[in-house]
Amino acid sequence: MPLRLFVDFDGTITRGDVGNIFYRTFGGAACDELVKRFRAGEINARECFRGEAKAMGRVSPGALGDLVDAQEIDPSFKGLVAFCRDRGVELLIVSDGLDYYIRRILARNDCGEVPFVSNSAALVRPGEDKCAEVSVAFPHSDAGCDRCACCKRNIMLTRSAEEDIIAYVGEGFSDRCPVRYADIVFAKDVLQTYCQDENISYYEYATFDDVVARLRTLLDRSRLRPRARAEAERRAAFRHES
């Protein structure tokens, strides 16, 4: 069966949560309050991100670029990219972050060819000082679900065929939904705790070297099989949409 691999970006590929750093560096404590309200269910993800972008005010493109360029990725990610290319594994980054920094970070680390799906951001209404406002948009949201602004579940299901085996790598809050639909899950940090609480089988990892080693073993050792619970979740999602 073909294997498709979906990977989170912030805190998974990058060392830190770039989105949080991006908003909070310029928006300050107002962004922390918005995140608290989101986690408490008082506002949805899109409202949270729009509020954070507004809290940033007018920002210098140069300052934004310097901030983004200071972010580091896990160097072992390049090994995963090479492994997927060599083994014919379809790799797609799925992120609840912003294309503004994802594209730049990937390009700076010689991974610009890796496809990704995310929310979008643009600098609008620049002034004479070249400072501008940050406008965010959500082209991959789900009208029926407010937990994330970019619906990773929908992306996974629409980008995969029925016979595909779906693997997912993540660590945070926005990864909790998609792992329910994945046959192979790699988890750490908050996502690892969620998988334990929800009785979702997973492989713990520290770096992408661990992911590559496990995938190589699975591909070489035996025929990949779907996870029964994930397969049932995918079928239920398709029935709901039809």
Image (cartoon, rainbow, N blue to C red):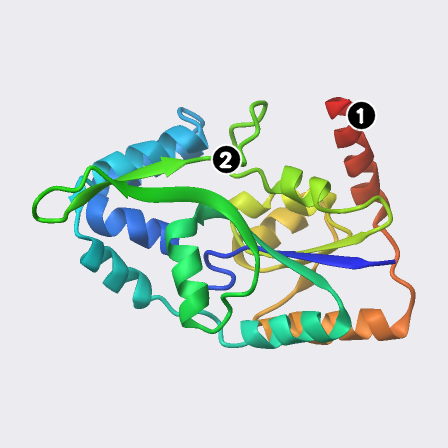
Which one is in front in this view, the residue at disc 1 or the one at disc 2? 2
Quadrant in the rendering for residue 41: top left
**Callout 1 touching callout 2 (CB < 8 Å):** no
Question: x and y percent of residue 28 in the render?
Answer: 21, 45
Location of mark 2 (residue) = 139
Front-lying residue, 70 or 226: 70
- Give me the residue at 82% from left, 52% from top: 164
Mark 1 nearby-residue class (10 Å; few <14, some 14–19, many ≥20): few
User: On the picture, is 69 further left or further right than 153?
Assistant: left
Q: Relative to 226, say whether 82 is above or below.
A: below
- Give me the residue at 68% from left, 75% from top: 83
- Give me the residue at 20% from left, 37% from top: 125
Question: x and y percent of residue 213 in the render?
Answer: 71, 76
Label 2: state its secondary structure. loop
Give the residue at the far left of this rendering.
Answer: 128
Front-lying residue, 205 or 85: 85
Q: Amino acid at mark 1?
A: Arg
User: On the picture, is 120 further left or further right than 139?
Assistant: left
Front-lying residue, 230 or 95: 95
Q: Amino acid at mark 2?
A: Pro
Residue 120 visible in this rendered orientation of the protein = yes
Please identify the quadrant where the C terminus is shown: top right
Question: x and y percent of residue 113 in the render?
Answer: 55, 65
Label 1: state its secondary structure. helix
Quadrant in the rendering for residue 114: bottom right
Q: Relative to 78, say whether 4 is above or below.
A: above
- Give me the residue at 83% from left, 70% from top: 219
Mark 2 nearby-residue class (10 Å; few <14, some 14–19, many ≥20): few
Location of mark 1 (residue) = 239
In the drawing, what numbered circle is on residue 66? Answer: none
